[in-house]
């Protein structure tokens, strides 16, 4: 069974995000134990505060990474994988017994300290998405990757 932690900045406020997450966590439950750790996002009034805000968020994120995990940080400038390659990547890590921790930043992105502490950087697109949406995309891609590795009818 996969052991996955999703460590993210911000909580879902809108019900449609909560409903989407509940659906994917339900789908994942036979295959993976998924824990969600939400870190309160720092308030900011200007993008000029990016370094200060992301540094504060980095300190909180880094303190919440579970011990003995492989840290995979989602970052817009990282290498992309298609769904099959992502499935193979996850299968390889889980075959080693790795507990995976995915990190998702907030509206201002991530501080370099988080990127430096990561074992892998991953991008789902060159496009920029709201951090709430990328969390749902991650959960869907985790489900897709697992169904690919289990030869279940989902990915065509």
Image: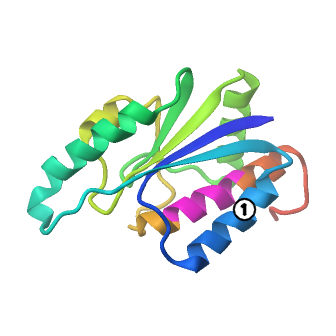
Report the residue at 51% width, 57% height from top.
Answer: 124
- Label 1 secondary element: helix
Q: In this rendering, would 130 be left or right of 54?
A: right
Report the residue at 23% width, 44% height from top.
Answer: 56
**Percent position of residue 5, x then y:** 59, 41
Report the residue at 80% width, 62% height from top.
Answer: 155
Quadrant holding the N terminus: top right
The verdict on residue 136 being magenta is yes
Q: Nearer the viewer, residue 63 or 107?
A: 63
Question: What is the magenta segment's predominant secondary structure?
Answer: helix
Q: Can you identify the residue that label 1 sits on?
A: 24
Q: Nearer the viewer, residue 37 or 89?
A: 37
**Percent position of residue 34, x then y:** 68, 45
Q: In this rendering, would 154 be left or right of 78?
A: right
Q: Quadrant of residue 43?
A: bottom left
Q: Quadrant of residue 156?
A: bottom right
Q: How many marks?
A: 1
**Percent position of residue 16, x then y:** 60, 79
The verdict on residue 150 being magenta is no
Report the residue at 26% width, 56% height from top.
Answer: 42
Q: In this rendering, would 20 be left or right of 76?
A: right
User: Magenta stretch?
Assistant: 134-142
Label 1 neighbour load within 10 Å: few <14, some 14-19, many 20+: some
On screen, 131 above or below 87? below
**Percent position of residue 63, x then y:** 38, 31
Q: How is the image coloured?
A: rainbow
On screen, 55 above or below 93? below
């Amino acid at each position: 069974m996969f052991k996955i932690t999703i460590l993210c900045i911000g909580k879902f406020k809108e019900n449609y995000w909560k409903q989407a997450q509940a659906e994917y966590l339900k789908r994942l439950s036979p295959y993976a134990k998924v824990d969600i750790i939400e870190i309160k996002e720092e308030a900011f009034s200007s993008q000029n505060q990016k370094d200060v805000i992301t540094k504060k968020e980095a300190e909180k994120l880094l303190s919440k990474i579970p011990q003995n995990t492989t840290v995979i940080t989602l970052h817009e400038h990282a290498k992309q994988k298609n769904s099959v390659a992502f499935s193979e990547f996850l299968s390889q890590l889980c075959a080693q017994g790795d507990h995976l921790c995915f990190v998702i930043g907030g509206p201002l992105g991530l501080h370099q300290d988080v990127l430096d502490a990561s074992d892998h950087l991953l991008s789902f697109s060159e496009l920029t998405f709201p951090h709430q949406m990328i969390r749902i995309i991650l959960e869907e891609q985790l489900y897709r990757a697992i169904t690919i590795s289990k030869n279940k009818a989902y990915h065509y």
